[in-house]
Image (spheres, helix red, strand yellow):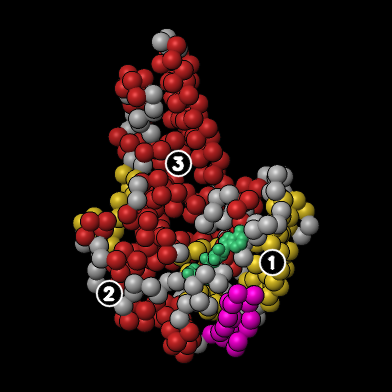
């Protein structure tokens, strides 16, 4: 996939810009706070229908205005598409491809895939399991529509079951039969999700492990999938947990409690990994995501690298530029606040590179 042109109106700090991209490697340099990440976020919007940073569409409107629009000309498998996202205060967000609106925004997910490697990614290592589930969900939803549908169903029934548990506690009476209907729904959609998480992880691991090795040499990185569903007998387990669920008013068994444990040399990365090791791990996670999407879709997503060099030593930066060079990636956007570092990197990259400077009043091509 290739972005040929990007037009923004009132998106974050940009009032109006219109940029044309000609190269596979696009480097965006500029001082802190000038809008480099915001530009990547606009591209992320075109892929995911939302921001990677701020979940409120309204806060992505340029201060003092009442709408924003993002228009990209994207080339996918030799065909051009005009992808447009518009949001006006108080109205529903609208998404058009070639001027046709979607009925459901979710239909767009996976159509124009992108992978963002962001400085916040190390939260994946440090924070709670929900972020790690979200990482794998985002990947699987982009490549498997059935997975997406089961996840929506599962979350819906889980919410309903939890509300029922609350209601039972408030009213001090219960309807066991009704709960069991929800249990059944959670077993049906949950087992599809569990199987797919397990199988896709097995397919994903070789990509991830190979990228980690390329970045970090001999260190062994692993991911272990942990799920209540591995205990088997799902329906019986929901029943077994019922008394506790009633007391806590929450469902204490199910795939919403799954975790993916990140390990370095067999030990928890969160506890033993240095900042650079954690950063290398999440870069390999994202590059693995990229490779998996390529393999499933048979075309290359857009790769967005935000401040990727921070915390990496010179050797790992070199390994990373080697990956960017060797692995015939598609179009890549790289942001950096340091001009010299970008110039060093550009020297290593064989593909044609365009450099843009992001300054207060917009984006200018400098080479
Ligand atoms: N809705 C908005 N309206 C106007 N400006 C905004 C809006 N949202 C964010 N900004 C501005 O965008 C700027 C941040 O831009 P961004 O994060 O893209 O910078 P950056 O170039 O990536 O900086 P760094 O090098 O520090 O990562 C901030 O100064 C912020 O005030
Ligand atoms: Mg930034």
Disc 2 and disc 1: Cα gap in Å? 45 Å
Work out whether mark 2 precedes mark 1 in sequence or the reverse, and give the earlier one: 1
Q: Which residue is mark 2?
A: 217
The residue at 43%/21% (across/down) is: 165
In the image, 247 versus 254, the foreground residue is 247
Q: What percent of the width, then of the height, locates residue 80? A: 72, 68
The residue at 54%/54% (across/down) is: 54
The residue at 40%/45% (across/down) is: 130
Disc 3 and disc 1: Cα gap in Å? 42 Å
- The quarter holding residue 340 reads bottom left
Mark carried by residue 15: 1
**Is disc 2 in contact with disc 3, using a CB cutoff of under 8 Å?**
no
Q: Secondary structure at mark 3?
A: helix
User: Is the residue indicated by label 3 positioned so its CB lies within 8 Å of ligand 2?
Assistant: no
Q: Which residues are magenta?
A: 351-367
Q: Secondary structure at mark 2?
A: loop
Work out whether mark 2 precedes mark 3 in sequence or the reverse, and give the earlier one: 3
Q: Is residue 236 visible?
A: no
Disc 2 and disc 3: Cα gap in Å? 33 Å
**Is disc 3 in contact with disc 1, using a CB cutoff of under 8 Å?**
no
């Amino acid at each position: 996939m290739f972005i040929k042109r990007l037009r923004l109106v009132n998106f974050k700090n940009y009032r109006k810009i219109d940029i044309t991209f000609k190269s596979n490697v696009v480097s965006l340099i500029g001082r802190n706070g000038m809008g480099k990440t915001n530009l990547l976020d606009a591209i992320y919007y075109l892929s995911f229908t939302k921001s990677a940073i701020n979940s409120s569409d309204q806060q992505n409107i340029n201060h003092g205005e009442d709408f924003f629009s993002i228009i990209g000309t994207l080339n996918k498998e030799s065909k051009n598409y005009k992808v447009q996202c518009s949001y006006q205060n108080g109205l529903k967000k609208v998404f058009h491809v070639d001027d046709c609106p979607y009925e459901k925004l979710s239909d767009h997910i996976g159509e124009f895939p992108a992978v963002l490697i962001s400085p916040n990614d190390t939260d994946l290592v440090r924070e709670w399991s929900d972020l790690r589930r979200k990482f794998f969900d985002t990947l699987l939803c982009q490549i498997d529509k059935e997975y997406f549908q089961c996840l929506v169903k599962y979350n819906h029934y889980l919410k309903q079951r939890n509300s029922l548990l609350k209601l039972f506690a408030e009213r001090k009476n219960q309807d066991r039969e009704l709960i069991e209907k929800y249990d059944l729904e959670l077993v049906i959609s949950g087992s599809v999700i569990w199987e797919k998480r397990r199988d896709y992880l097995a397919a994903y691991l070789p990509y991830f492990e190979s990228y980690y090795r390329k970045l970090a040499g001999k260190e062994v990185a692993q991911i272990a999938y942990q799920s209540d569903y591995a205990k088997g007998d799902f329906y019986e387990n929901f029943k077994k947990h019922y008394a506790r669920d009633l007391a806590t008013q929450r469902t204490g068994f199910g795939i919403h409690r799954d975790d993916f444990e990140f390990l370095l040399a067999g030990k928890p990365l969160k506890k033993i990994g240095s900042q650079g090791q954690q950063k290398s791990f999440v870069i390999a996670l994202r590059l693995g995501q990229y490779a998996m999407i390529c393999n499933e879709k048979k075309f290359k997503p857009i790769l967005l690298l935000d401040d990727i060099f921070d915390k990496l030593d010179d050797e790992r930066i070199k390994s990373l530029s080697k990956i960017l060079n060797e692995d015939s990636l598609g179009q890549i956007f790289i942001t950096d606040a340091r001009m010299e570092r970008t110039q060093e990197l550009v020297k290593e990259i064989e593909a044609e590179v365009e450099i843009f400077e992001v300054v207060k009043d917009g984006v200018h091509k400098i080479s």
